[in-house]
């Protein structure tokens, strides 16, 4: 039986966004241990606040402080916390309707076990020791048997308001290629590029997926393509990626390898970024011990005629 390939993969994108006046006030308030909601024209108080009424779609900006105490409306037990979650020990994800609010806020609830959690239980905010103006300024909720806390009536006006945040979106998973991609990956280790031909339309797809995306039929006929190819389109990258030791600006391009009917992507090197162009003929450059080309460089051939690659744009 052939070896089943698998590898850990991480997709990560630190998304930077600016904040409008409502979200800015909410997050700045958390930094100052104040929870703000927004009041709609019919008197409902929404926490977390939004800038448009989800029922009427009208603009809303009337900020109102709510209490740091509240009631669990529903919950689910998390027996195995993952990296980056609020607590490192088992906890409950809970929707908590804070006193004075008409909607619930999702956050972690620190409890000794699932038997200690129930809908209707009273809780309060446990504030983080260091606060920066983010939802994590609420470290978690904790069980609470005291009376209802009364808000001070904060207006939402703060010095040095938070105007932007960075949301670190990340997905960790284990990837296992199927039969077709296993053949493709193993061929790359021998510095060969192998695709598969559709038995119906006769197009060669690289990388192969085991089925033709146009005809929907299985593919099995292996075809070696390249190694040279043509730049069909490209972009100039001006933002340096985390953990990628490549100086900007550089060019990332779609490359139609000779004999392939689908362009794959790769970095273009060996030429100034502003001289890369559609139709440029390129070849792979391998580094010692690499399982895939490090980049593609110009071959010195004349540029390919547009009609030879226009269907691959």
Image (cartoon, rainbow, N blue to C red):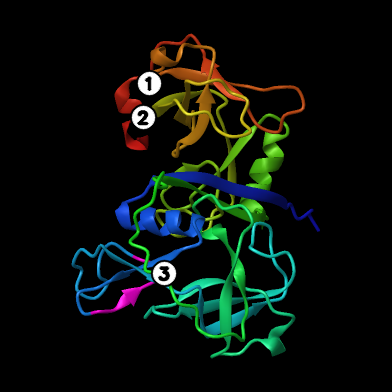
Q: CA distance from mark 3 to mark 1?
A: 67 Å
Contact flag, marks 3 and 2 (Cβ < 8 Å): no
- Magenta stretch, main secondary structure, is loop
Q: Which mark is drawn over residue 152?
A: 3
Q: Which mark is drawn over residue 309?
A: 2
118 part of magenta stretch: no
Q: Which residues are magenta?
A: 43-49
48 part of magenta stretch: yes
Q: CA distance from mark 3 to mark 2?
A: 67 Å
Q: Is residue 161 visible?
A: yes
Residue 148 drawn above or below residue 62? below
Label 2 Cα neighbours within 10 Å, binned few <14 / some 14-19 / many ≥20 = some
Residue at the front extreme?
152
Contact flag, marks 3 and 1 (Cβ < 8 Å): no
Q: Position of residue 23 (x, y in %)?
A: 37, 57
Identify which residue, 265 or 204, lies in the foreground.
265
Identify which residue is drawn at 47% across, 53% down.
212
Identify which residue is drawn at 50% across, 83% down.
148
Residue at the top extreme?
300
Element type at mark 3? loop
Label 1 Cα neighbours within 10 Å, binned few <14 / some 14-19 / many ≥20 = many
Residue 130 drawn above or below residue 288? below
Q: Earlier in the sequence, mark 3 or mark 2?
A: 3
**Residue highlighted by disc 1:** 279
Q: CA distance from mark 2 to mark 1?
A: 8 Å
Which mark is nearer the camera, 3 or 2? Answer: 3
Element type at mark 2? loop
Q: Is residue 178 visible?
A: no
Contact flag, marks 2 and 1 (Cβ < 8 Å): yes
Q: Earlier in the sequence, mark 3 or mark 1?
A: 3
Identify which residue is drawn at 70% across, 51% down.
8
């Amino acid at each position: 039986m052939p070896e089943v390939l698998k590898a850990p993969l991480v997709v990560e994108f630190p998304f930077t966004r600016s904040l409008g006046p409502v979200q800015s006030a909410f997050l700045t308030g958390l930094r100052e241990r104040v929870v703000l909601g927004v009041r709609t024209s019919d008197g409902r108080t929404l926490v977390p606040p939004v800038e448009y009424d989800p029922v009427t779609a009208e603009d809303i900006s009337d900020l109102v402080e709510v209490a740091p105490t509240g009631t669990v409306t529903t919950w689910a037990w998390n027996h195995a916390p993952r990296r980056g979650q609020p607590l490192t020990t088992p906890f409950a994800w809970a929707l908590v309707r804070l006193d004075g609010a008409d909607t619930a806020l999702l956050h972690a609830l620190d409890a000794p076990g699932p038997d200690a959690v129930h809908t209707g239980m009273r809780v309060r905010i446990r504030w983080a020791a260091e606060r920066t103006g983010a939802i994590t300024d609420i470290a978690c909720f904790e069980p609470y048997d005291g009376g209802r806390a009364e808000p001070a009536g904060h207006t939402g006006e703060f010095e040095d308001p938070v105007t932007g945040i960075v949301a670190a979106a990340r997905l960790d998973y284990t990837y296992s290629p199927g039969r077709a991609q296993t053949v493709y990956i193993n061929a790359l280790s021998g510095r060969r590029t192998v695709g598969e031909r559709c038995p119906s339309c006769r197009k060669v797809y690289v990388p192969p997926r085991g089925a033709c995306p146009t005809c929907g039929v299985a593919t099995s006929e292996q075809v070696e393509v390249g190694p040279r190819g043509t730049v069909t389109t490209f972009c100039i990258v001006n933002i340096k990626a985390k953990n990628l030791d490549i100086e900007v600006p550089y060019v990332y391009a779609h490359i139609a390898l000779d004999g392939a009917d689908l362009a794959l992507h790769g970095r273009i090197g060996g030429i100034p970024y502003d001289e890369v162009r559609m139709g440029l003929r390129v070849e792979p450059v391998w580094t010692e011990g690499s399982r895939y080309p490090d980049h593609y460089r110009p071959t010195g051939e004349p540029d390919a005629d547009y009609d030879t690659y226009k269907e691959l744009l």
